[in-house]
Amino acid sequence: MTEAIAKGRTIHFLPAYRPEHTLKLSEWLNIPPSSVDGKKSIEFIKAVVNMRNYKTDEEVAEIDRATTISYRMHVAGMQAAKAGMREYEVMSIVHQTALKNGCSLSFPIICTTHGETLHNHNYSFMLRNGDMLLIDAGAELPSGYCGDISSTMPVSGKFTDRQRTVCDIVAAAHQAAVQALKPGVAFRDIYYLASQTIVEGMKSIGLMKGDAKEAVMAGAHAMFFQCGLGHMMGLDVHDMENLGEVWVGYDGEPKSTQFGIKSLRLARPLESGFVLTVEPGVYFIPTLIDLWSAEKRFADFINYEELMKWRDFGGIRHEEDYLITNDGYQRLGDPKEKTQLMQSFF
């Protein structure tokens, strides 16, 4: 490398994935560590993204297997969860199931009765009847390929009427998004479709009002749906995350700065061979409710008087993994046992 630099040759390297990689590049390139990221090769990033975004049949088979094991992890945790247990007890059963199937975790498990806290890794709370338990967990095969599934269950074994209503809204958003999956459709538009479905659901229970499309374009839906709809998946659960979402999920197009959609990891038009998650959710975040209510933000779309009655509801997410095919989509993994278990909760 020293000789190449001396000759004025361009050195192409990817963004450093670990701190030690930054230090090695700093030494090799003879530049300060703080300057390393600014020297990364956009040309190299785009080449790797364009290679890895399209999964081969062998890769799809591995992801399918990882997703099936991920479903087993969820079933084991959901079958074990009972009032009086701590979240960490259920989490350990989910983790043990991955290990029993020869896998590690594709990311730290989320197992919480406070699903309104996105990416919650606190496992200290006791499960109580009336609570919902949100599990977001996936298996990683020895080959490195990942699964990523989310489930929400009632601790008592039966959803309350209010919980069932919101579950149905999330399911409707999920179904609308899945049915729209096909090559050529921008995932950003599928996000908008899922968001509008959630707004219509919120209108049906008196929490929102007005035109659903206008509400989403304004950003009012983010009271309930603050995160993205999905992400690319493969050798990493957020595939190629270190290469930058603007390249992996946006093909170089700029991301929105609007609260809610700015968290969308994938927006580009879908293509055959892409593997991605679909994971709509509805989250009642008390701090956000209090903040927007005090500001009267989006008062034309949000019925705050009624929303206050739901302040401590929690959160629900439903997530599955999909392959984009030449003419549509294919759900990955075998969800049959989990589907049967979920049906028993209604």
Image (cartoon, rainbow, N blue to C red):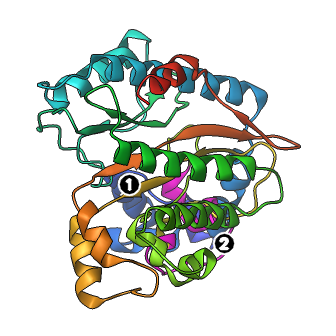
Q: Quadrant of residue 77?
A: top left
Quarter where residue 13 is shown: bottom right
Residue 24 circle label: 1
Q: Residues within 10 Å of mark 2 (few under 14, many from 20)?
A: some
Which residue is at 39% across, 52% downward?
Answer: 21
Lower position in the chain sequence, tag 1 or tag 2: 1
Q: Nearer the viewer, residue 179 or 144?
A: 179
Secondary element at image label 1: helix
Toward the viewer: 4 or 57? 57
- Residue 222 seen in render: yes
Region in magenta? 240-261
Specify the amino acid type for callout 2: Gly
Dot 2 lies on which element? Answer: loop
Q: Which image quarter holds the C terminus?
A: top left
> Mark 2 = which residue?
252
Q: Position of residue 140 (x, y in %)?
A: 47, 27
With 274 as the anchor, is 225 left or right in this view? left
Side (left or right) of 110 relative to 336: left
Query: Residue at (49%, 36%) from the top-left corner?
Result: 148
Res. 11 in view: no
Question: How far separated are the C-alphas under marks 1 and 2?
Answer: 28 Å
Instruction: Please determine whether, in this image, residue 104 is positioned above or below residue 258.
Output: above
Q: Nearer the viewer, mark 1 or mark 2?
A: 2
What residue type is disc 1 on? Lys
Q: Tell me the crowding category of disc 1: few under 14, some 14 to 19, or many 20 or more residues within 10 angstroms, Cα based.
A: some
